[in-house]
Image (cartoon, grey):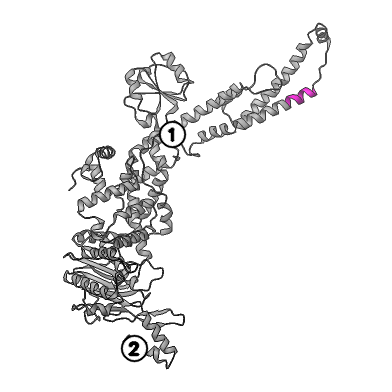
């Protein structure tokens, strides 16, 4: 029984503290773990999907008293489970779903209620999957990732809080902006000019600061993030922007068929969230096109340097042309003035007139081309000095003044909009998280639904009897499987079997490459999937739940004494009274045929006596039957012969109570047909009778 986080294996004091801090209480954190809320756990700093899965698996095993290896009793059985999960995962649209599928495990018969509940849930999802447009959803789902909420932002250097008391100074440090402690209003004004926006504490409320200072007054101790640094509040939304928008689209699609989906979130919540996000960029900035004034100022900034460089060249060319065309006529007193040594004044006046003409024309041209308003055009008036110079240069300080003015205008307008967005979105953070978590969990079920739809799977009937019945079953591991019918033990599909119709222990005979391994692999798939609450690859299926599943694959040749002893020890585990299913593929290869037949017959008897269910693939069916008095059913996958290329002509459906012919027998039979009158081949064939 788990009463606290520290009751879960691998959770220490530090991990428990981090989980509690994130979820607000230990109970909330414990609920997230017990309920398998992987998406919520992944939002915790330092928790990856893999570690969240491991944590939940540990917790589930502790709560339910059963782990995956309690049912899958052999490494081969576990390997088949792994292949099934891998096959299902291929239909996942999110990495999250692919990972969380590992939480689905086969359960023993004492978890029948859980299995049937999963069947009902998955059945509903399969029905939903049949209604949804896969092409529409797959693209949206693939863009959704678990929420990460621990996004930090760098200190905003062009924004400051100016405080008048040490207490406010300390309180202001929690915000990601520059913080200054200033007592004198004059000093405060000087400090403020170094920032594009300033927040003054209430100690400066009565002070009238110059117009060139962009400031506001706030009670620092009561100020919220959205008022001081809206970028911090918006970081959650901007960093998860694509996931949130995609999840909203998926939610809306699903609600067309199920209006109770994600019922914690109302339509009004979705509308407010969508509205708040539509003007936000992925960098916590105002999206281009939202505010025409911001876009205008930004456009001016972007083109300013190019325009200045071009205009500087043009003003010099124009000035040169005017000078080239100039001539001075000296008359009357001007001549006397020239004789008096004052000719320079005459030239200077002529140059100044032309200089003023070209610079004023250039100022107007810059204003017109950039589309400057009256406040901005004042800065252009400072682009040229009063003294005539050649070549004419545009004053960099004047350009810098215009740039700073534009930046302040953009910053001020953006800050106002960002504050509005942050104020509107701040209460919807949990709403966004809930939508993403719900849609991610939907994809886990939807993945199973798509898998079931693609392979035409059906929910098996859970029966009380000890048996498995399959109608038109298809092996998931084969590209183009042939549907087969087969039944072992007590099922409603035993009609027509004849003798040993409800036999729980069966020998499966047949030619090499005839499909015997395919049959027991299909049985293994159905056993595992049905005990997971999943649909199975058959048109119709009945399954009696068991406690343990054993699968023993083919041995790689005759074993030495040590390996043989180890194998016999492996089989000894079936000698218990637990309800079990055992599938074995050609066990006889572990030692010489005579000894193998004796050993297999003994294992079959043990399985029969302990209420077990088993299918043993073997080429030694006759020898095995000679070594037991038990009524063991022998089924066979029959080959009617060989074609011209020596390929088997096989009926993949096992024949009940039938010992199938072996490949060597078929080859000798073919030789007899092709060599009429050859008595040697006939005598060899007679040995098989």
**Of 422 and 156, which appears nearest the observer?**
156
* Stretch in magenta: 318-325
| Residue in view at x 36 percent, y 87 percent | 685
Q: Position of residue 224 (x, y in %)?
A: 34, 30
- Most distant residue in the front direction: 561
The label number, if any, that marks residue 686 in the structure image: 2
Rendered image quadrant of residue 483: bottom left
User: Can you identify the residue that label 1 sits on?
Assistant: 417
Which one is nearer the viewer's eye here, 46 or 223? 46
Q: Pointer 1 and pointer 2: residues touching (CB < 8 Å)?
A: no
Q: Is residue 321 magenta?
A: yes
* Residue 472 visible, this angle: yes
Pick the front one: 650 or 508: 508
- Provide residue 75's location: percent of width, then percent of height: 29, 60
Q: Is residue 100 above or below residue 649?
A: above
Q: Residue at x 22, y 42 (%)?
A: 6
Residue 266 visible in the snapshot? no
* In the rendered image, the vertical position of residue 640 relative to residue 309, given as above or below: below
- Quarter where residue 570 is shown: bottom left
Q: Secondary structure at mark 1?
A: helix
User: Does 254 appear above or below 605?
Assistant: above
* Helix, strand or loop for disc 2: helix
Which circle, 1 or 2, is nearer the viewer?
Answer: 2
Tell me the quadrant of the picture where the C terminus can be found. bottom left
- x, y percent for residue 108: 21, 61
Measured as percent of width and height from the top left, residue 101 is found at 32, 55
Above-or-below relation of 401 to 50: above
Residue lying farthest bottom? Answer: 677
């Amino acid at each position: 029984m788990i009463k606290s986080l520290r009751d879960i294996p691998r959770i220490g004091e530090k991990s428990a503290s981090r989980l509690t801090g994130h979820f607000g209480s230990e109970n909330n954190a414990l609920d997230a773990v017990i309920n398998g809320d992987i998406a919520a756990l992944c939002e915790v700093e330092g928790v990856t999907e893999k570690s969240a899965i491991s944590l939940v698996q540990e917790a589930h095993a502790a709560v339910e008293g059963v782990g995956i290896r309690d049912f899958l009793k052999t490494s081969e059985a576990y390997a088949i489970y792994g292949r099934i999960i891998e096959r299902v995962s291929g239909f996942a649209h999110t990495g999250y779903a692919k990972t969380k599928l590992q939480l689905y495990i086969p359960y023993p018969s004492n978890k029948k209620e859980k299995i049937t509940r999963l069947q009902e849930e998955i059945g509903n999802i399969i029905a939903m999957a049949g209604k949804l447009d896969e092409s529409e959803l797959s693209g949206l789902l693939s863009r959704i990732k678990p929420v990460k909420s621990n996004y930090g932002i760098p200190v905003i250097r062009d924004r400051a809080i100016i405080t008048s008391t040490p207490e406010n100074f300390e309180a202001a440090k929690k915000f990601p902006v520059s913080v200054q402690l200033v007592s004198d209003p004059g000093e405060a004004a000087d400090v403020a000019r170094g920032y594009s926006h300033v927040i003054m504490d209430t100690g400066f409320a009565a002070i009238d600061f110059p117009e060139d200072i962009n400031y506001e007054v706030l009670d620092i101790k009561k100020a919220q993030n959205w008022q001081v640094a809206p970028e911090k509040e918006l970081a959650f939304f901007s960093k998860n922007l694509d996931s949130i928008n995609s999840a909203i689209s998926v939610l809306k699609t699903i609600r067309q068929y199920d209006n109770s989906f994600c019922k914690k979130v109302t339509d009004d919540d979705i509308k407010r969230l969508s509205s708040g996000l539509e003007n936000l960029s992925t960098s916590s900035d105002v999206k281009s096109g939202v505010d025409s004034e911001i876009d205008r100022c930004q456009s001016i900034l972007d083109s300013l340097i190019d325009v200045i460089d071009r205009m500087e060249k043009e003003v010099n060319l124009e000035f040169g042309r005017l000078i080239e065309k100039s001539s001075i006529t000296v008359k009357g007193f001007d001549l006397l003035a020239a004789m008096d040594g004052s000719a320079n004044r005459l030239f200077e006046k002529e140059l100044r007139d032309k200089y003023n003409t070209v610079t004023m024309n250039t100022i107007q041209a810059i204003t017109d081309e950039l589309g400057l308003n009256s406040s901005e055009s004042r800065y252009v008036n400072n682009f040229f000095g009063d003294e005539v110079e050649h070549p004419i240069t545009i004053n960099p300080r004047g350009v810098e003044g215009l740039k700073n003015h534009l930046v302040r205008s953009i910053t001020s307008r953006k800050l106002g909009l960002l504050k509005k967005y942050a104020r509107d979105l701040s209460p919807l953070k949990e709403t966004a998280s809930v939508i993403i978590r719900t849609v991610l969990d939907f994809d886990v079920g939807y993945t199973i639904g798509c898998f079931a739809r693609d392979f035409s799977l059906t929910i098996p009937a859970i029966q009380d009897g000890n048996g498995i019945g399959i109608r038109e079953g298809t092996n998931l591991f084969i590209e183009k499987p042939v549907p087969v019918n087969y039944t072992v033990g007590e099922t409603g599909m035993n009609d027509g079997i004849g003798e040993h119709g409800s036999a729980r222990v069966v020998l499966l005979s047949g030619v090499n490459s005839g499909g015997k391994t395919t049959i027991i692999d299909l049985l293994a798939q159905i056993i595992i999937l049905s005990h997971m609450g999943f649909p199975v690859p058959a048109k119709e299926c009945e399954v009696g739940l068991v406690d343990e599943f054993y699968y023993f694959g083919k041995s790689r040749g005759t074993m030495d004494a040590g390996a043989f002893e180890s194998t016999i020890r492996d089989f000894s585990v079936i000698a218990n009274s637990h309800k079990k299913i055992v599938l074995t593929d050609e066990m006889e290869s572990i030692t010489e045929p005579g000894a193998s037949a004796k050993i297999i017959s003994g294992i079959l008897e043990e399985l029969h006596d302990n209420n077990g269910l088993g299918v043993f693939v073997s080429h030694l069916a006759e020898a095995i039957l000679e070594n037991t008095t038990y009524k063991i059913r022998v089924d066979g996958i029959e080959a009617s012969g060989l074609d011209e290329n020596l390929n088997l002509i096989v009926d993949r459906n096992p024949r009940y109570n039938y010992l199938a012919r072996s490949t060597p027998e078929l080859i000798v039979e073919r030789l007899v047909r092709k060599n009429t009158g050859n008595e040697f081949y006939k005598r060899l064939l007679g040995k098989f009778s």
